[in-house]
Image (cartoon, coloured by chain):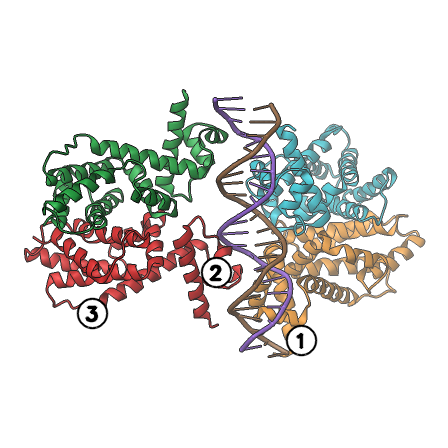
Chain colours: A green, B red, C orange, D cyan, E brown, F purple
Amino acid sequence: MIQSEKRQKILHATLAMIAEHGFHGAPIADIADRAGVGAGTIYRYFATKDILITELFRQLHEKIYMRLLEGYDAKKPHRERFLHLNTSLLHYFVTNPLEFRFIEQYLSSPYSILFWQNLKQGKGEAGLFLYHRLFEEAVAQKIMKDLSLNIFFALAFGPLLVMARENVLGFIVLDEVLITGTIKACWDAIKR
Amino acid sequence: MIQSEKRQKILHATLAMIAEHGFHGAPIADIADRAGVGAGTIYRYFATKDILITELFRQLHEKIYMRLLEGYDAKKPHRERFLHLNTSLLHYFVTNPLEFRFIEQYLSSPYSILFWQNLKQGKGEAGLFLYHRLFEEAVAQKIMKDLSLNIFFALAFGPLLVMARENVLGFIVLDEVLITGTIKACWDAIKR
Amino acid sequence: MIQSEKRQKILHATLAMIAEHGFHGAPIADIADRAGVGAGTIYRYFATKDILITELFRQLHEKIYMRLLEGYDAKKPHRERFLHLNTSLLHYFVTNPLEFRFIEQYLSSPYSILFWQNLKQGKGEAGLFLYHRLFEEAVAQKIMKDLSLNIFFALAFGPLLVMARENVLGFIVLDEVLITGTIKACWDAIKR
Amino acid sequence: MIQSEKRQKILHATLAMIAEHGFHGAPIADIADRAGVGAGTIYRYFATKDILITELFRQLHEKIYMRLLEGYDAKKPHRERFLHLNTSLLHYFVTNPLEFRFIEQYLSSPYSILFWQNLKQGKGEAGLFLYHRLFEEAVAQKIMKDLSLNIFFALAFGPLLVMARENVLGFIVLDEVLITGTIKACWDAIKR
DNA sequence: GATGAATGAGCGTTCATTCAT
DNA sequence: AATGAATGAACGCTCATTCAT
């Protein structure tokens, strides 16, 4: 097994363990077992458990950002761009429930405070950047309500996160129709 | 100090510790110190740490439900009722940031699985019940879109949770005007 | 309830708890519950738990000694006296299994070291004293083997303790005939 | 140090601590110190303290059984076989006082209930098996008294246990002559 | 005198991290 | 480079003892 493969196995085992059992139920020994490596080996790739977790989040975040960019066309109408982004994101969470469970826990915990701060300071390329531009333009063109960016984020992401959670818990089954329908409703909340 | 006071002190210390430092950073010894009691004392009121945490959530949940009922009038128009509920809730989170931080972490963690299941099975009186009725009526009267309950919950709560988080992290300052404005936008998402 | 009654209740609760659950499984709180008194009350009668246990043993020891004296006639033949003492003792253990369980654990634990030392130094009146005299006389009169006192104790008490244990564990049912028969066999071991 | 050595060091430290200070006075931390290992290390070899103790007893029991078999010849006369077994056992206890102290406490405590039950049900090879056969034959051949097995055990082991205790407490000094003499007296108790 | 709530030292156990192999 | 046995600090929890009522 080459190095980067091993690194990925460790990251994935961490993802699965935390997604399924929470931060509480994910000791390094179990992660190592699940990754098929020795416990000590993990420390050759990640200096501490916290860094492993932070790095896992960073990687997922980047991966999702890349996914959102796929097929995104900054020249299309704002509504269409918005639908594209949110539909992609929700679709991603629905097809990757473990990742969603991890991200959800990460973002709700004190772990994420640094992430949020960096994000708001514009450090690190992020999906938010796309929304940022989209919202600013649309507000200027009076297509969207005259609300602040943070409010738009709330109106745009909030419903999506709750739906992804309901999906992961088995309370709803999200198909393409339902996803599109709901994202359209989100648009209603922000459009003028 | 009378017994129920001490119990409340313990619950509040738990709330504050977990809100500020996460489940990780809240050992019983620290909670006890913060509550001004001995570590052993906590176990006179709560059999295990898990039960303490679960009970804390249950109590907050009940308290918030009561708060939502205040001034709620089932005879008023649906939009007004919706605005009342969501405004009250967001207002509550804004004025009780520690409680929000705790609730957010609790609901994102495996702790909450039981809670969600009970909720969906209608066990325990909950704020959701009010929304339930409200949504069903409004859908029947073609005031709201023809979406499922779970989708409404997502559209109604999602933005609110994100805003409360942004508020607690200091990214936005929510005043009454902003709260009302955003909740009205939420209504746009669900109304026909 | 008068004082001495309460004291007895505490002693009996201690006896029962330790007999049934061992030294491990007998916290003061449980003993207090079983005795029907407050936990603090126990400390008005016994300075520490160790003293309570030691005093319980002392009391049982004295009680049993008194029992052995009943009907004991130093003028009867040695064999008869021996049969009387051992039969009484085994009978006592059979009819008081909790006391036997407690005594057995006490004597096997480091608690008892002091007791043994005192006994050997002749401190405290004890059943052993009767045996002491009996053995010395019988050896002098060539009725018993020419063995040391300690060996006689072993030959006289050893079988009795094992039988009492087998009885308490339900492996044998000891009736009068069996008791007498076995004690007679013990006599065979020590007589010339 | 190889693994099995470390395991043995832990078992021996447990033996010594419990023999000297009782179950009470043998916390894992002290056992670990005495074994020269970290406290956590013990849990790599034994899942719980109870399992450590139970396993220690099991191992001692097996070792002693093996010792009794040494030089045991089922074709020799019953008396000789009996003297061999009991002399070996008492000799073992005299030369291994710590083991005797531990075994004594173990067998008197609630720990041992399971052991007794298994023994009586014939589970696990045990020294008792040898006695079993010996007694049955000797009774059939009218060499021994017509008593039940349990009674024989009492008459055979009882004195031996008391003597071992007196030896360990320093009240008697058992040499070969004394051991043999006493065991012969035990035979008198069971022979016809 | 009697209580039982309160205490905190001390327990058994876990687990992030280290390091000899 | 990789391992996993070893570690011990830190955890959740218990319980003998105290003391305000």
- Residue D46 circle label: none
Q: In this rendering, do the residues under marks 1 and 3 share a single chain?
A: no
Image side of residue C167 versus residue A93, left or right: right
Q: Are marks 2 and 3 on the same chain?
A: yes
Residue D106 placement (x, y as % from top left): 66, 47
Look at the numbered disc 2 and give the secondary structure of its residue. Answer: helix
Q: Which residue is mark 3?
A: B71
Which quarter of the rendering shows the N terminus of chain D? top right
Circle on res. C4: 1
The single residue placed furthest to the front in the displayed view is A140
Farthest residue toward the right? C140
Which residue is at a point 38% across and 48% down the rendered structure image?
A110
Residue drawn at point x = 69 percent, y = 46 percent = D18
Residue type at mark 1: give it.
Ser
Q: Quadrant of residue B187?
A: bottom left
The residue carrying mark 2 is: B34
The image quarter in which residue D49 lies: top right
Q: How many marks?
A: 3
Outermost top residue: A1
Q: Residues within 10 Å of mark 3 (few under 14, many from 20)?
A: few
